[in-house]
Image (spheres, coloured by chain):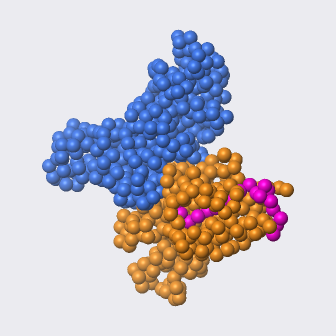
Chain colours: A orange, B blue
């Protein structure tokens, strides 16, 4: 039998799980609830049990499985040590060691944003390129950096925290991280809504945005597509701040490609157009040719990336 | 005989050369002039001849030499292709292939700033750490980024161009790169002199800086050490801009250590004190523990790093 790999993406409410071939073909996917009570002590046993059940259902033997990749919402270092996952109630521990108590398979762990990036680069918008930054524009702004085909996780698992690039000295509202003027205060879904509300409050010009029941990134980009002048100015502000941030990242690591994902990216190519306009303005000429594309795997990026963690980890060891 | 390695650092006026053991002990160092006439076509033959002469002098056989590392003032990609060295008159070519015409040894090429960083990390201030950013504050601001012990050269050799991080939307003077508000317009030796001259022009307060025959970073930091109020304000501005830039780099790659080198770093620990004050203010909390130290190899960093290119390259292939 061809070898199988499990990719597991642990979120705050559900655990997404996927069964893959070693070529990265998704054979099956399903979800289980994330039980965060008792400091999340049920989460890994639940996952192990669900994997065993799936193996029984598909008649897969232990010897057929290369390993289990697990992505978690918190920093993970190169040795697979989880450093703290507030949303799961977890402290610091070795996830492979812990999982082995419940299932005897090699486990490879990674941060969720990084794993999603690895998935996008492997089987999504990244098209297998070696040097890619995946930018996730969701509730916050997450980043996953792939250098020479591997996740750049940083010395303490805090690599790719691009949502907290300092972009504005004059910001008076505090970011969730405690600093002021972070990239995600302007370029996340909530950041775009904030920019729009600020713009509306600063002028009395007519705009379809004034009629919106609730402000969000979709409302803003729909208005941009309809030619709404105020919405277009909001998109310019968004594009300038994110373009400038991505230019600074390119000056540091010179990727060949940016993959833009997350809820905001559902507005499509127009998001890239606004960002790229300012990226080109601010970036050092050596990185001016960096390409941009949209993410394609959506919520499955995490399970793909987790599966890839196993294949890379096995290759490395 | 223990194996030998040559480290060669090609500059615009001189070529620095070093003979190393494979443990990185420097046995001998010397220089030859860089002959840039005729599109720099003599440079590689001159280097080959100088290596042969040194081998004869030291009675070293070809089979005793692991290889030659060469650092050049321009972008070099992962395959050792030099993309253009304006200062040498060079276009794009494969430096290993070209050198083999003159001496039959494996050649490994890298960008000079990156090689100097590799040298500092290997045998200098970096203390052998795996994730380090070396910041060179000289005429410009150069960067060398080491991730998992290897140079991060980027997809087109433009990684580590940290001198061109965009730091200021309100700058009216153009940087050498064509953009406005680049980090090196404030944090290089010339940038610090510019900040000082601007500060003096903006006020009429007394300062020892007003008596300086020519303004430079040494004059400014000497005045800071003497307690000059205006000079201290200049140092704060320098520290805030560089600290903010290094914070943004840390949010991307989360290094464990910054090594500060170049002419400006000769002022000593006080440079780090001003930078770290603002770094801690602006950086994401996950990178707040990043350490700072001064470079120790000075102008020899390039030959050390070039030698290390050989050892890493041989290990990799």
Q: Position of residue A295 (x, y in %)?
A: 65, 65
Question: Which residue is found at the position 46% from the left and 77% from the top?
Answer: A194
* Residue A124 or residue B130, whichever sits in front: B130
For the C terminus of chain B, give its image quadrant: top right
Q: Is residue A105 left or right of residue B308?
A: right
Q: Quadrant of residue B152?
A: top right
Instruction: Judge whether residue B140 can be spotted in this image.
Output: no
* Residue B66 or residue A106, whichever sits in front: A106
Magenta residues, start to end: A57-75
Picture layout, residue B136 above or below residue A175: above
Q: Does the segment drawn in magenta span residue A63?
A: yes
Question: Which residue is found at the position 34% from the left and 55% from the top?
Answer: B278
Q: Position of residue A54 (x, y in %)?
A: 77, 68
Picture layout, residue B38 above or below residue B277: above
Q: Position of residue A16 (x, y in %)?
A: 67, 70
* Residue A258 or residue A232, whichever sits in front: A258
Question: Which residue is found at the position 64% from the left and 23% from the top?
Answer: B105
């Amino acid at each position: 039998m061809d070898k199988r790999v499990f990719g597991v993406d642990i979120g705050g409410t559900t655990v997404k799980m996927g069964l893959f071939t070693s070529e990265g073909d998704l054979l099956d996917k399903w979800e289980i609830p994330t039980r965060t009570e008792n400091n999340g002590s049920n989460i890994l046993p639940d996952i192990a049990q669900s994997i065993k059940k799936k193996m029984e259902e598909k008649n897969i033997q232990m010897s057929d499985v290369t390993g289990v990749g697990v992505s978690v919402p918190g920093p993970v270092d190169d040795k697979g040590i989880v450093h703290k996952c507030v949303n799961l109630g977890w402290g610091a521990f070795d996830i492979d060691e812990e999982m082995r108590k419940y299932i005897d398979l090699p486990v490879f762990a990674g941060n969720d944003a990084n794993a999603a990036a690895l998935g996008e680069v492997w089987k999504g918008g990244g098209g297998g390129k070696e040097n890619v930054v995946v930018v996730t524009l969701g509730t916050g702004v997450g980043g996953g950096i792939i250098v020479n085909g591997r996740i750049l996780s940083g010395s303490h698992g805090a690599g790719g925290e691009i949502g907290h690039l300092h972009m504005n000295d004059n910001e008076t509202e505090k970011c969730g991280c405690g600093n002021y003027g972070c990239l995600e205060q302007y370029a996340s879904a909530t950041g775009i809504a904030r920019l729009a509300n600020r713009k509306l409050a600063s002028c009395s010009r007519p705009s379809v945005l004034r009629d919106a029941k609730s402000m969000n990134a979709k409302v803003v980009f729909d208005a941009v597509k309809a030619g709404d002048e105020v919405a277009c100015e909001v998109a310019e502000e968004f594009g300038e701040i994110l373009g400038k941030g991505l230019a600074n990242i390119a000056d540091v690591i010179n990727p060949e490609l940016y993959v833009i994902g997350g809820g905001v990216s559902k507005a499509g190519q127009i998001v890239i157009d606004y960002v790229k306009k300012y990226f080109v303005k601010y970036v050092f000429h050596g990185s001016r040719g960096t390409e941009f594309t949209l993410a394609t795997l959506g919520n499955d990026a995490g399970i793909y990336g987790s599966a890839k963690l196993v294949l890379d980890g096995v290759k490395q060891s």
